[in-house]
Amino acid sequence: MHENEKHENAQHHDAVGHRRRRGRAARRLLAAVAVAVVAVPAAVTGAAAASAEGASTTGAQASVDGGPTSIAYVEVNDEDLSNVGRYTLEDGSNAFDVAIIFAANIDYDGTEAVLSLNERVQATLDDAENQIRPLQAKGIDVSLSVLGNHQGAGIANFTSPEAAADFAAQVADVVERYGLDGVDLDDEYSDYGVGGTPQPNGQSAGWLISALRAELPDAVLSFYDIGPASDSLATTDPAVNAQLDYAWNPYYGSWRVPAIPGLGKQQLSPAAVDIQATSASTAAALAQRTVDEGYGVFLTYSLPGGDRSAFVSSFTQPLYGQDALYR
């Protein structure tokens, strides 16, 4: 690609990125509008909605102003996704910005990779009216995590761009059918080589990211920085990686900066917290370091049912200066 084409492509990606990444300050406005609309006469709700819509285009810079974007993985085999929306800060804004359905699987049918939805994931999608739409109405994005299933297929062993594109089309169909906001890629549990399946290669993950971005130009694309795909993206063309919105550390209770050329600090979470396993003191320290070192994302995993606001407050206080409430 010629230098002027690279520049034009970078400008285009920046413009698209600013449209699809809704910063935390914009989310706070959306949440405030959602609360206010309940008490506002119908004649003025249009103006409020227009204000919120304008805020949603402010892009990555808004997350700098409003604090790090917070991520909540939910094991829907055991818990309801809708619980994410019950946590707010003291000012009424959301405690979490992105809820991730964990997880869809990559199966192998003897010929190619096939997207598989287990019974609980399918039930969550089918119950979108109660599990997904209320979160989105609050300004919380909902993504679908995709990872291996011990069958030799995963994001790191597509053998051609066409194979990656075929799988991306399957994922995009689910995202569009159920009105989701994004896709999270996780290179775990693939067991590459099982049953004669291909070994990982250095181009597969990049092919899949590019294919997903082509299928879902406005979706939130994130990467759980683990596995052979992590190794390959560390040396991938930054222009390919820049099609991602976020990447994060997969090792809970630790600090590890994802090495993904093409992503800036505002798109990375070096901190990783398991809400059911990491101590509150460690969560607080990781949150404070996130703020001190200027990173724009904070990752949490395994949000359980019931009120865990005391633990959630251990990181919302350093991140946003407010306790979390469970409503």
Image: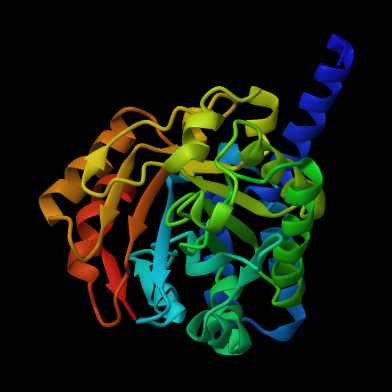
Name the colouring of the figure: rainbow
Residue at 54% x, 83% y is 124
Most distant residue in the top direction: 3
Residue at 73% x, 32% y is 14
Give residue 278's quadrant in the image: bottom left
Residue at 28% x, 56% y is 322
Give residue 10's quadrant in the image: top right
283 over 236 or under it: above or below: below
x, y (%) of residue 284?
19, 48
Count of labels in the image = 0
Residue at 62% x, 88% y is 126
The reply to whether residue 218 is in sight is: yes
Q: In which quarter of the image is the N terminus?
A: top right
The reply to whether residue 142 is in sight is: no
* Residue in front for this viewpoint, 255 or 148: 148
* Residue in front for this viewpoint, 170 or 60: 170
144 over 322 or under it: above or below: below
171 over 60 or under it: above or below: below
x, y (%) of residue 163?
76, 50
* Residue in front for this viewpoint, 134 or 238: 238
x, y (%) of residue 76?
43, 78
Give residue 3's quadrant in the image: top right
x, y (%) of residue 177?
75, 76
Q: In which quarter of the image is the C terminus?
A: bottom left
Left or right: residue 90 versus residue 215 is left
202 over 274 or under it: above or below: above
